[in-house]
Image (cartoon, helix red, strand yellow):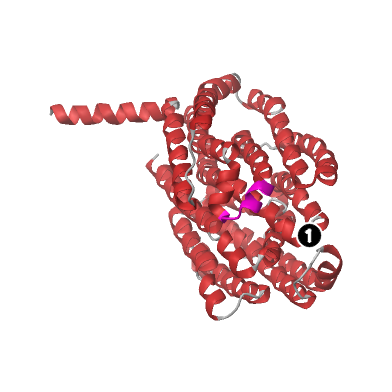
Amino acid sequence: MSGIKHNIIASYVSQIYVTLIGIALVPVYVSYMGAEAYGLIGFYAMLQSWFMLLDLGLTPTMSRETARLRGHEADAPGLRALLRTLEGIFVGIGFLGAAAMIAASGLIADSWLKVQTLPVTEVQGSIMLIGVIIALRWISDLYRGVINGFERLVWLGAFNVGIATMRFVFVIPLFVYVGTRPMQFFGYQLVLSVLEVAFLVIEAYRLLPNLPGGQRPSWAWQRLRSLLHFSLAIGFSGVVWTLATQTDKLLLSKLLPLTEYAYFTLAVVMAGGIIVISTPISGALMPRMVALDAEGNEIDFIRLYRNSTQMAAVIVVPAVLVLALFSERVLWAWTGDLQIARHSAMVLTSYALGNGIMALGAFPFYLQYAKGDLKLHMIGSALFLVLLIPTLIWATNRYGMTGAGYAWLGANVGYFVAWVPLVHRRFVSGLHKLWLLDDLALIIVATGLAAVVVRPWVRWPLGRASTAIMILALGLGLLVIAGAASSWLREIVRARWRALSRRATI
């Protein structure tokens, strides 16, 4: 278990750093570039998510196969051949995607985006650069999948921290000494994307087992076909995720002026921190669950699943409550702009609640992934889309970004209440009641009651820095309460206390 603990800690440190540095510096970007130019960055983030539709589940499939076959020297040729085959697919699709973006850049700049003050040529050139950056970053995910499959999350976390520092922090000297035009910003990001791919390729191939006798890897089309059922199921999940999380952003990029779209993006970026802080658990959890299932170790499999759920709840629930209940104060402390805070507060509230429910409701997917059976996930995801997409289109057209937030929240509540129990009953009889009541309910209820009781008594200071400190203090207080409500964490504390007591008596 020490290995998975180290991986989770490393993943959390890196993810929290990447998230916080990205969120913290957004107001700096807005200050240097202006809100409209920052709207282009939000548009870039949205397009990158839509590009993931082309993955078709191949990256997580590569990660799963790496986790399953690592350490088996006899499978080295097959693993390398699979990677070579996927490399050909990824490079080919990446090239076509970048070419399509470049070809459509004029149409997007002239007809899709509601540009007000930026030169259209500047916007068009930025979109061309965006197309190449997205293709490179998508290709890099294939090698991240290999490294993740080898459970080298400590190295990967350190690498992500380094890249994020270069991406978010080192761009500020560019603003100061070179310029703040969008094309200058995206040109810098393009150079970083090339370096990112290069380092990930080197590390992935260093981890792969050597082929005997200088043998060269062949193409593995037959092996890939045998994995397509699982891969396409994962790919369908990716399609659902993209449609669910990006349809609102795509619609609003057309409906809203680029400046207002930037305001919406600011709220969604802050709420997206909820998903990000839960992601490291899944990254460390899924390879280990795959291995335990392959060993037939059902007891440790379920124990790991339930303990990881509590770990996620202890971290996610306090963050959700702070963002949802104190959304206007959070946005003001972050941006220093009262208009942004008031305009986007309800969006942050609804997206934070929806993302929190999604983060906890994702655990049944990890269960199905480890078992290699995603049939129920595909059905549930299709039903989720049937519920979300029409509601989202109607609410976004009628109520703008506030309507999009409420549609997102409602769809996630419906999925969690109606579908999650069915998945648990299908795979482990009696699990859902334990998972919901013993692992989640007390953490959610205790932390939620504390937040609601404290809220009317909070006396907010006048300064941004002191407000941020107050928000942090509230979050830490709720984190302590959530931890105290977790049976898993209480047992760890008791075990450590007993061990210290035994040492003291020796």
The one nearer the camera, 172 or 354, is 172
Whether residue 203 is visible to the viewer of this picture, yes or no, is no
Spot the residue most to the front. Answer: 462
Q: Quadrant of residue 441?
A: top right
Secondary structure of the residue carrying tag 1 is loop
Q: In the image, residue 417 lies at what x, y percent?
A: 69, 26
Is residue 354 visible to the viewer in this orientation of the structure? yes
User: Vertically, is 384 above or below 209?
Assistant: above
Q: Place residue 324 in its image quadrant.
A: top right
Q: Nearer the viewer, residue 78 or 395?
A: 395
Q: Which residue is mark 1?
A: 257
Magenta segment range? Answer: 335-344
**Looking at the image, which residue is at 70% across and 35% down?**
412
What secondary structure prevails in the magenta region? helix
The local crowd at label 1, few if under 14, some if 14 to 19, many if 20 or more residues have their Cα within 10 Å, is some
Q: Is residue 88 left or right of residue 276?
A: right
